[in-house]
Amino acid sequence: MYYKFPAQLCMLLLFSYNACIAEQNVIANSSNTVDSSANYTNADRAISSENRDTAAISYLEKMFVSANRMQRLMETAHSLSVVKADQWAGTGKTIADVISGQSGVHTRRYGGTGSMQTVSIRGIPGSRIQVFVDGVALNSSMGGAVDLGKLNPERFESIEIHKGITPSSFGGNGIGGVVNLRTKRPTPGENGTKIMVSGGSYGLLESCIDVFRHFDTIATLGAYLSYKHAKNTFPYLDRNNTVTITSDDQIRYVNNGEYTNAQGGLTGDYWLNNSSVIRCRLEHTRISGGIPAEESKENVTAGYTQNCTVGDIRIVSDKKYGSRMTLEPRMNFEIKTGETHSTGLDHFSHPHGTLTSGDYIELGYRDIKANCALQLNYKPCVWWSLNALMSITGEDFDPFSSKNDSIHGEWPGRRVQGSFSTTLDFLSEKTGLGLELEGAIEGIYTQTDGGVDSYFKYSVPDNDTTEMEKSWRAGLRWTGITGCLLFANLGSYYKIPSLHERYGSFGAVLPNPDLATESGQTIDCGIKLNLSRCYVEIIGFYNLLKNGIYVHNDGRYLKSRNIGGANVYGIEANVALPVIKYLEFENHLTIQRTENSSDISYYKGLHLPGEPPVINEFMTRIGPWYNFDLQYLLEFHSACYRDFKNVQRVPADITKKGLFFNSFRLRWYPSRGFSLAVSANNITMFNFSWKDLPGNYENAKTHIVYPGREYRLTLEYQF
């Protein structure tokens, strides 16, 4: 039974807004529109090294960044959250940790540093959420959620979360929403080097070096190297898989959980003229680590490695609306290889019985993806504009196994996807009334080589499928009063089954080529007020998911079926009120009802697992003041359920209304370009045992442990 949330906590509706009246003047006087696909505009060049004070981010720069952020929010007629890098710098938080408290957003963490982390938006799970880096999709054609725990936050300058609505610049089609990460770029006119060294709890060590150079007024070049290693030997409560018996409980330490991430890359910008820039990025990442066993068991040799090389080149218009029409072409590629391995010394549950001590199993893949796209921005007059994106993506997935007759794996397959999305925007300056019409059409060709499954005694023939789907959105907005935005949106989206869902996996999941397309509808409406001394945002939303694809166990076999569904509705409320010049508050509140509308009768009408009905994040900042600044963050997640049957409550203690998570960061700037930060995450509890956390139904883990009291010391020097 869910409780009534205390009215006192519901009053904490504070949203990030870290400037005063001066920031309004910055917005009013700025002639540059913040570009949704660029990382900075010409206005950023005005902030040169001579204007920087001894703090890494001066109060003047904070006003400018906050003004651009507020302008971005007020220009967007749907629910949007924007998080800047200064919020997570020196904290050791992952991308998922950073966005976990944003309104409408919930993340799940499944271990220590480098472990899998996924995001859900308004009750829609991570497998339906699209994740982009500079507009380049990270989602694989094999399906599944993007792992945010392995993305290096040091490489990004901001995060945007589009909730419910998927803009046409990201393909215009997404049931849950979009997370877009923007990489750091060298600042025009500046040369410098930045070094970061950090150490922390459970054997954490991280270092990073960035070098950036400016060539005359036409080009910049940046290079970076980073390294992170963590032993992840944190304690946890092992209940020995006996929930009701406490006599056999003991404190154990996670073993075989080491994690290593090494990354290097180059970035470059070349200005063609005053309005366009060629932007390039080449990056390689290598990740390796061990795989801890389930509760009460140990792994000795199990581990994995991943290698990823990414290249991206594009032309970006720096003054998108400075001319009637701009074209922004881009090309990118991604090459991934990876493998997991184990022996008979490890406690894995293989589908073909227990391994002997001499057995060795390796399961790997090679995944190659390439994309070409063209963005058109056309604004012939002040009252209407057209934005369109044409894109084609090809992906080839080639798995391998060291023991094809005894271990499961994916079938080899290919996928070609072509899409066209467009947005028509009409605005009457006289009345302040605007209309947005958005449509997208997508064609997807999937093919698999198939093969024979010797375990289940069936064969998957060489076959292919071609499908085409459409999505649409309509939105109204009103800006008749300065600093006020009223909006309402209605949209319909879809998701074509992935290769894994359609063809299953060798020895584990049966194929189901007749899967139907998932579909979803979203409605939201709200108000945004950007006043001289405060910012207020209240949004109501409703999401509907139909024909949801889930792996179903009928007692004999696993098979993907269209049995899922969800009705999610709620309110996001955000308010900010700067108290004094050096004191600001930020808070995000979500109140939602996530109702399971599955075709399975005994699940229907219950709460979706792992989705708290109330999430509240409160953050306060003090400074920079006397070369110090302090940031404190408090999250509250109300009680929810671990399982679809709503039996296993989280937290298990019914006297607890939910879980609190505390973290802080204290930074000191003793001299120009130098900073020292001390931070701590999850300082409320010593550790989080599996009984305190929701299960992960996206990767089949239900007993989860991750550390508490993660301390970190970070040293940065820029010259």
Image (spheres, rainbow, N blue to C red):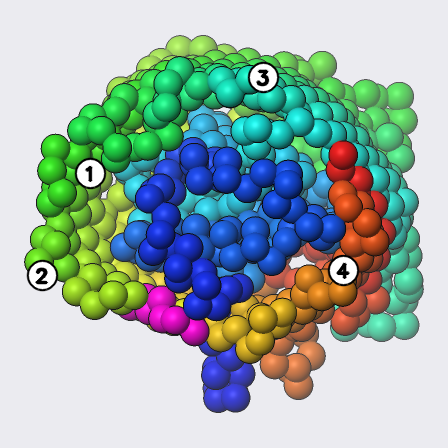
* Residue situated in front as seen by the camera: 84 or 342: 84
Q: Is residue 579 visible?
A: yes
The answer to whether 379 appears left or right of 430 in the picture is right
Instruction: Give the amino acid at mark 4.
Output: Asn
The answer to whether 95 appears left or right of 253 in the picture is left
Whole-percent x, y for residue 157 in the image: 57, 41
Whole-percent x, y for residue 127 in the image: 47, 42
Q: Are marks 3 and 2 in contact (CB under 8 Å)?
A: no
Whole-percent x, y for residue 409 in the image: 60, 23
Inter-mark Cα distance, 3 to 2? 47 Å
* Residue under label 4: 627
Inter-mark Cα distance, 1 to 3? 37 Å
Q: Is 623 drawn above or below residue 491 in the view shown?
A: below
The answer to whether 390 appears left or right of 681 in the picture is left
Inter-mark Cα distance, 4 to 3? 32 Å
- SS for dot 2: loop
The quadrant holding residue 684 is bottom right
Q: Is residue 242 visible?
A: no
Q: Earlier in the sequence, mark 1 or mark 2?
A: 1
* Residue under label 2: 431
What is the residue that sits farthest to the bottom in this orientation? 7
Label number found at residue 215: 3
Q: Are marks 1 and 2 in contact (CB under 8 Å)?
A: no
Q: Earlier in the sequence, mark 1 or mark 4?
A: 1
Label number found at residue 423: 1
Q: Earlier in the sequence, mark 3 or mark 2?
A: 3
The answer to whether 435 appears left or right of 15 in the picture is left
- SS for dot 3: strand
